Amino acid sequence: MSQTDLLDRAAERLADRRARLTPTRRRLLQVLEAAPGPRTVPELQIDLADIPVSSLYRALTSLEEAQVVIRLRDSAGTGRYELAEWITGHHHHVTCTVCGRTEDVAVGDGLETAIGRLLSDVAAEHRYRISGHRIEIEGVCSACQRH
């Protein structure tokens, strides 16, 4: 999706909730689109240093309510934000348990199909109907391994 399409669709979603695509929300979406994975508020502040943290949280809340942005929690309970999958496409995450760095990971269709079969079997065994899935892979990134 092009940046123009992203901003247009985000503006539509916000308008449905009687909100608008403010300059702060626009810049936040651009930073999230360029990020290699979900970002914490302190990480977002690096690129948005001129935006007060209270405004950043308000923008994140509005975009989350409009389902343009989603908030994830890593294993340490830290909130991380990223664009919703209807924008980015389906993907998973890999997170460093030492430094907290989180990156998006796309897997091939064959592997995603195999994951889907496995999850369907687990869900059937517990009498659940699957509505989606996310895989969070934890490990130690190459930078932390060197230390």
Image (tube, rainbow, N blue to C red):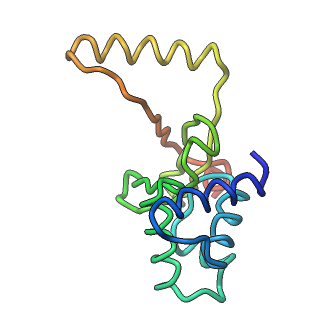
Q: Residue 88, how many percent across, how many down?
A: 64, 43
The correct choice, above or below, for 118 with respect to 132 in the image is above
Residue 89 % position (x, y):
62, 37
* Residue nearer the viewer, 49 or 2: 2
Report whether 134 appears left or right of 31.
left
| Residue depicted at 52% across the width and 43% down the height | 139
The image shows residue 135, relative to residue 18, as above or below, that is above
Q: Residue at x 60, y 72 (%)?
A: 25
Query: In the figure, is residue 111 to the left or right of 116?
Result: right
Task: Quadrant for the C terminus, please.
Answer: bottom right
Which residue is found at the position 46% from the left and 85% from the top? Answer: 54
Q: Residue at x 40, y 62 (%)?
A: 78
Q: Position of residue 102 (x, y in %)?
A: 57, 52
Q: How many marks?
A: 0
The extreme left residue here reads 126
Front in this rendered view, residue 46 or 76: 46
Q: Is residue 70 left or right of residue 77?
A: right
Q: Position of residue 73 (x, y in %)?
A: 39, 55
Nearer to us in this view, 86 or 19: 19
On-image quarter of the N terminus: top right
Relative height, residue 86 to residue 115 (above, below): below
